[in-house]
Amino acid sequence: MLAAFRVRSYRFQWPADLLTSWAFEMETLILGWYMLEETGSVTLLAVLGALQYMGTFIAPLFGLAGDRMGRRTVLCTMRVTYFTLAIAMMAFGLTGVLTPYHVFGLVFLMGLVRPSDIVLRNSLIGDTMPRANLTNALGFSRATGDSAKIAGALAGAGLLSTLGIGITYVFIAGFYLASFALTFGVTKVRPDDGTTDPGASPWRDLLDGLAYTWKTPNVRMIMWMAFLVNLTAVPWTTGLAAYLAKEIFLLDANGLGRMIAGYACGALSGSLLLAWIGGSRRPALLMFLVAMTWYALLAVLAQVRDPETGAWVMVAIGACHSGTMILMGVALIGWAEPRFRGRVMGVRSLSVQGVPFGLLAAGPIIEMIGFSQTLEIYCAIGAVATVLLAIQNRRFL
C-alpha cells in the first residue's frame, strides 16, 4: 500500500505537494472572504476567482519550460514565487495597508503560475517513480489534494477569524518555504536523460490534440461536456463560495471553512465510491446521469436558506462534481487512441477556462437579479445543454 514511499524522491515530493496544496486552499478561502468583507461586491469576488485561473491560458509555456529546464527546477521556481507573493501579502496585512487593489494584483500574478502546479507535480512523479509504483503514487497524490482542501479550509478559516489576515499569511508563507525546501530533495531528472524529446513542442502537441478531438465525435462530446460543467456548475462552489456562505447562509469565516470542508468530504467520498464499485462499461452514460444530478442539487441549493441543510447539499454536490470529472477521464482514456491520449488530456485541461467565464458572467447578473435566480438560470442552461448533448451523441452512450 505504501510502495511509493519506498522511493526516496517521493518521500520528499509528497510532503512538499501537501504543504503547497494546504497553502493554496487557505489562500483561496481567506482572500475570497477578505474581498467580500472589504467590498461587499459579488462582482469583485467573481473577478478575484477568475484571476486565479488566468494561468490556464499559458499553461503550455510551463510545460515547455519543464521539458527544457527540468520539471524540478521549474517547480522550485514556481514555489519560491508563491513564497515571495505570500511574503508581500503578509507585509501588507501586518502593516495594515492591505487593500483590494493589492489583493487583485498579487492574485493576478499568482494565478498565472498556480494552475500549472498540479500538472507539473504529476509529471515529476512520472519522471521519478518506477512504473510499477506509479498508480500507487498518483493515488496518494489525488488523496492529498482532497484532504488538503478539507484541512486547508478549516485551518484557514480558524486562523483568519482568530489571528487576522497578516498573521495567517505568516503560516502560509511558512508552508510555501517548507515546500520549496522539500522540493529540492526530489530527484533531478535532466532534460537530456532521454525523458524528453528536445524537438517536441507542447504547442504542436496541443494543436494535434485539438485536431484529433474535433475529428473524433465521442471525444469531442466529452470535451463539450467538460467545458459546460466548468462554465455553469463549478463556479458556484469555488469562486462564489464566500458569497454563498456570508450572504445566503449568514455564516462567518469559520462557517465558510466548514462548508468548503463538507464539500471536499463529498468529493473524496465520490472518488472512493467510484473506486469501490469499479469501472462502468458505459462511463459516458453514467457521466451524464451524475451531471444531471449535480444540476438538480444546485437547483435545490438555490432555494435553501438553512445552513445545516445547505451543508448536506454541498456534500452531495461535491460527490457529483468528483464523480462527473472522474467518469469524463475514464471515458476519454477508454476512447482516445493510445498515441493521442496525452494530447487529448492536455486539451481536456483547457476546459477549465470555462470557470473564469462563468464567474465573470455570474457576478453582475447576481447583482441585477439575485443569487437564486442566477443560479437557477445557470442550472437550466446546463441541464438543457446536457440533455441535448446526450441526445445528439446517444450512439456513444
Image: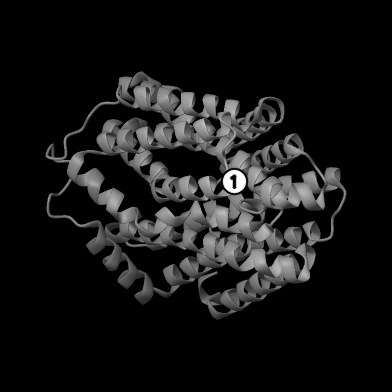
Question: What colouring does the structure picture have?
Answer: one colour
Is residue 321 visible to us here?
A: yes
Residue drawn 62% across the image and 39% down it: 30
Which quadrant of the figure contains the C terminus? bottom right
**Does 210 sit left or right of 277 as displayed?**
left
Q: Quadrant of residue 177?
A: top left
Residue drawn 58% across the image and 56% down it: 324
| Callout 1 crowding tier (Cα within 10 Å): few <14, some 14–19, many ≥20 | some
| Image position, residue 254 (x, y; %) | 74, 34
Q: Secondary structure at mark 1?
A: helix
**Does 363 sit left or right of 395 as displayed?**
right
| Image position, residue 204 (x, y; %) | 23, 63
Residue drawn 84% across the image and 60% down it: 303
| Image position, residue 170 (x, y; %) | 53, 25
* Residue at image mark 1: 274
In front of the other: 396 or 12: 12
Disc count in the image?
1
Q: Quadrant of residue 154?
A: top right
Q: Amino acid at mark 1?
A: Leu
Residue drawn 25% across the image and 35% down it: 73
| Image position, residue 201 (x, y; %) | 20, 57
Q: Residue furthest right?
A: 306
Is residue 334 visible to us here?
A: no
**Does 204 sit left or right of 111 as displayed?**
left
In front of the other: 277 or 136: 136
In front of the other: 205 or 51: 51
